[in-house]
Amino acid sequence: MKRLENIKRILIANRGEIAIRAIRAIRELGGESIAIYSEADKNSMHVKLADYSICVGKAPSDQSYLNIPSILSAIEISYADAVYPGYGFLSENPNFAAILEKSNIKFIGPRSETTRLTGDKAAARKAAQEADVPIIPGSPPVETLKEALAVADEIGYPVLLKAAAGGGGRGMRVAHTPQELARLLPVAQREAEANFGDSRVYIEKYILNPKHIEIQILADEHGNVVYIGDRECSVQRRHQKLLEEAPSPFISDEVRKKMGEAAVRFAKHVGFVGAGTVEFIVDKDMNFYFIEMNGRIQVEHPVSEMVSGIDLVAWQMLIADGQKLTFSQEDIKNQGHAIEFRINAEDPETFTPNPGTITELYLPGGFGVRVDTHIYKGYTVPPYYDSLIAKLIVYGKDREEAIIRGKRALSELVIDGIKTTRDFHLKILEDPEFKAGIYTTSLVDTKYLGIKE
């Protein structure tokens, strides 16, 4: 196994399972891990497992995990020479990355100017077009209703209003008529301002019942860029992913290759370095269109690791260490099938958050089963953060075996004291559309939540 050569003390600017995932990689690479935590997370497992730990503030994330001055102080007193951001929080904050760059602290992710570009969805669309990557018909940001109506009239209804600085499915609205567009444009602009501090909204043609498929890439500082493979992420509720699998059961190998090559073109065009994901939607005829690029590790990265045998988190760190990729595109041979189930502290019927104390816990195991989590018996899930408490990942020689193993592993999982999404996943595995691999992003909303767009 390769070892870190230039960065040794890595501060993890995150919490929960991704912080533990980073701690494990750092230890195997020969580095030292520094955990930060809020007052609400003082008993969290990532604090117990790290080599060092520092409290950075009170429970609310804006006073702790998003508190840049406090985190910078933690970096200074711990003599950290790199920061691992994980996902969420500051992972795609170009200002944070720029501050670290000026301080000669390595940000384990893309350069700040790249993050600034890819984080602006309108600018990323333009870059995709320049890189000859297919994009959905749409517009640059619009300011007035007159502009919006003109765009919608040209591309045809329904249309999707999207926050230019958005992400994670937030700030999106669908308009089916000019009247709806007139009503929703100011709503979308207010949501964009409230969520991202940027009121700009752009318009895209709304693709009915698409598949959401993403390509994992790795890019080093020496110009080498590869795609690891694809992930199917179409099991979503209200644009939030719930289950992911690799590879997609829908697209052909020919389309898979074209999507991978398009992702590499985009990454090279924007000068991307690190582990990132280029996301696409795919219509019923397998035409694919660029949505966005996420310049960080994804929650669903384990399914790509399971089928490729490549440790993506370790490679994030090795790339930041200045090391070259040791494999080429031809060396990547994905095998088998993997499925990830997001276990959230939520009511499985309504997806309402359900924080509380875990009174009993049994995690499944056995061949082809992996669990990434920070919970333990007696742990209290705090109400301040995302409801994700565990990721159950299963692997099989093919999709059928992975589904069977998923049912077995989910049936073994015991988390008492709070409600979780376990039973929802068992239901999805029995769904005819899911089993056939023909499900789309509308599956959960329409069939299980009764939401019509």
Image (cartoon, rainbow, N blue to C red):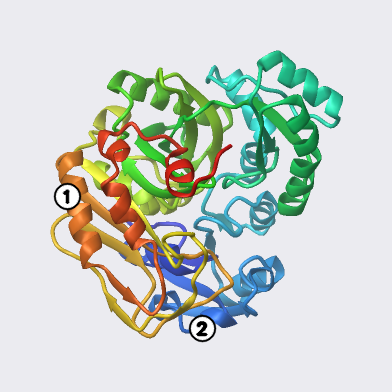
**Which quarter of the rendered picture does the N terminus lie within?**
bottom left
Left or right, 393 with respect to 138, comes to left
Residue drawn at x 49%, y 35% is 279
| Quadrant in the rendering for residue 431 | top left
Q: Earlier in the sequence, mark 2 or mark 1?
A: 2
Q: Is residue 122 left or right of residue 438?
A: right
Tell me where residue 435 appears, x and y as whole percent. 25, 39
Residue 309 visible in image: no
Q: What element carries label 1?
A: helix
Q: Residue 175's spot in the image, x, y percent?
A: 68, 31
- The residue pinned by badge 2 equals 42
At horizontal 30% and vertical 22% (from top left) the residue drawn is 252
Hey, what amino acid is under mark 1? Answer: Ile
Give coordinates of residue 332: x percent, y percent.
Answer: 26, 34
The answer to whether 143 is drawn above or below residue 5 in the figure is above
Residue 404's mark? 1
Quadrant containing the C terminus is top right
Check the image and name the residue furthest to the front: 450
